[in-house]
Image (tube, helix red, strand yellow):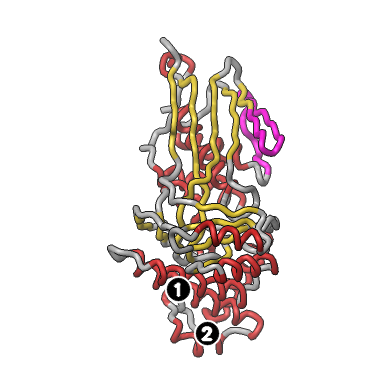
Amino acid sequence: MSVTETDMQTLLEKIITVAPGRTCLFGDHQDYLELPVIACAINRHIQLTAFKNNTGLLLINKPDIGEKRIIDLNIPIGKVEKGDHLLAAIKILQDYDCVPTHGYDITISGNIAINAGTSSSSALMLAWVHFLIKAYGCNVPLTKAFLSKISHQAEVAFHGAPGGKMDHYSIGLGHVMYMETGADAHYKLFDKQLPGLIVAESGIPKDTTGVLGELKEKALLAIHQIKQKLPAFEIDMAKKADLPKLLKYVSDELGIYLEAAILNHDITQRALREFEKDQWDMQHIGALMSEHHQILKTFLKITVPRIDDMIDGAISAGALGAKIVGSGRGGSIVVLSRDGTQAKVIEALLKAGAKDAYTVVVDQGVRIIESRYLKQ
């Protein structure tokens, strides 16, 4: 049940939630086709700090971007404007008896680069949803999977945005995650580190909605053309060996998008077999990352010259593999270096034009790091 003003002795005076960023290791431009992905949470974070106030207002401050907002809890939520993910989350959670009844002074800040392909917006959503449920209660068990589900609904499904489930579940669940991105959102977690992992930012903003929408539409059109001839066709069952036959059913314009989907799916499955082993072959994982990048570059054309230079620089410095991350045409790359050579690879990345480059480690996912009740 949600908290009421008669439960003052149980109200939380202070809440701090943190949510990590994420990087996609395998499966970029796959989750919107309900194909699997492999991603991992990384130790860059959004932190939400909330202090209870004596108003019916949520006073939100985002100092990193110079933005402030007031949500008046005394005003019923009507139409939620497109892009208002914070209010969408509040409205969705009302169905779970999570109803805000008292105000907080809230500060949201962090060190996840904005618009760089490491999911700062999704991390914000996970931190926000975890705060709401911690502050106001909920009528279902609080799990990381539930937090991920609500955050995805608020940021993507509520207004029909083109993104998939990878970001929210990777950030929510933490660790290295393999995820079947269909309706069931089946996943496996691998609780190991990836030594030598580096994220490098290009400094070029990405156009997430535009790129995802464009490439998703073309891939779905290719699949539709095949289904007109082969009604039983399912993209997740297609193999590399099937491509010569399947491409006969697709227009020349769309064939490359079908080919990219099937080839990237094959790479992700090979990577999964490696992650399921007791000991990971880092050289093999790096090679698969680079193979995946070549499909994203040559088939989907989502790189830009600076990112190409960064990839080349990392590999020339001895990295095991590297790839662009996320929607592309800007944003960041992820690099797997030999452990102990990170400084050399980072230097090469910066020389190649990276705005920033830094080592990361696999993170445990969204969590509460402090909660303090009002004194009775």
Which of the two discs, 1 and 2, sits closer to the camera? 1
Q: Which residue is mark 1?
A: 267
Residue placed at 46% from the left, 33% from the top? 133
| Cα separation between marks 1 and 2 | 27 Å
Of the 4 image quadrants, the one containing the N terminus is: top left
First in residue order: circle 1 vs circle 2? 2
Q: Tell me the amino acid under the disc marked 2.
A: Lys
Q: Is residue 223 depicted above or below 74 in this figure?
A: below
Q: Secondary structure at mark 1?
A: helix
Which mark, by number, is residue 229?
2
Residue placed at 48% from the left, 58% from the top? 197
- On whether residue 272 falls in the magenta region, the answer is no
Viewer-closest of 348 and 89: 348
Image coordinates for residue 109, horizontal then vertical, percent: 60, 36
Q: Is residue 27 left or right of residue 275?
A: right
Image coordinates for residue 264, horizontal then vertical, percent: 50, 73
Q: Secondary structure at mark 2?
A: helix
